[in-house]
Amino acid sequence: MIIRQTKDTLSQIYLDALALRKEVFVDEQKVPVELEIDQDEAHAIHFVLYEASQPIATARILEKANGVAKLQRMAVKKTARGTGNGALLIKEIEKRCEELAFTRIELGAQVTAEGFYRALGFKPFGDYFQDAGIKHIAMQKALTE
């Protein structure tokens, strides 16, 4: 397993992230592609977890105000779910966020993934909301200083 990251939207890492997001969000969950790929692509740090050179999990972070990182577009290949790969990627992203001096990570979790994020120490805040026709809950986690 290896995790790579990039801000370069012309890199193979980014292209692998997009392909995995398309597979999970557009093909499986029927999210319109115009909602999946947005104006923040070039501003985000994109992470991809590879197994035997195949991308199996991805996520991106965006910098918000006041030391907050926004975790978005978390996707795990269907055949790699439930194996700890998503948790491995999140832990690596948390380390990178600490290196970048972020003090908190926020995310909008699909309700089907709320338990996954709770197990990693994220706590819900605010009300449930709809995003791309899917019910979500805002969650956050304080990082160690």
Image (cartoon, rainbow, N blue to C red):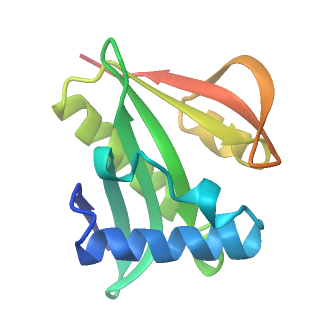
Left or right, residue 96 beside residue 44: left
Please report the residue visible at 24 percent of the width from the left and 71 percent of the height from the top: 10
- Percent position (x, y) of residue 116? 65, 45
- Percent position (x, y) of residue 112? 78, 49
Please report the residue visible at 23 percent of the width from the left and 72 percent of the height from the top: 11
- Residue 6 occupies which quadrant of the picture? bottom left
- Is any atom of residue 144 visible in this view? yes
- Is any atom of residue 77 visible in this view? no
Left or right, residue 73 beside residue 91: right
- Percent position (x, y) of residue 65? 35, 16
Closer to the camera in the image, 42 or 21 = 42
Please report the residue visible at 34 percent of the width from the left and 38 percent of the height from the top: 94
- Residue 35 occupies which quadrant of the picture? bottom right
Q: Is residue 119 above or below residue 55?
A: above
Q: In which quarter of the image is the C terminus?
A: top left
Q: In this view, does 54 lie above or below 3?
A: below
- As drawn, the residue found furthest toward the top would be 66
Left or right, residue 112 beside residue 17: right
| Number of numbered labels in the structure image | 0
Left or right, residue 111 beside residue 1: right
Closer to the camera in the image, 14 or 123 = 14
Please report the residue visible at 64 percent of the width from the left and 34 percent of the height from the top: 118
- Percent position (x, y) of residue 61? 38, 42
Q: In this view, does 27 lie above or below 34?
A: below
Q: Quadrant of the N terminus?
A: bottom left
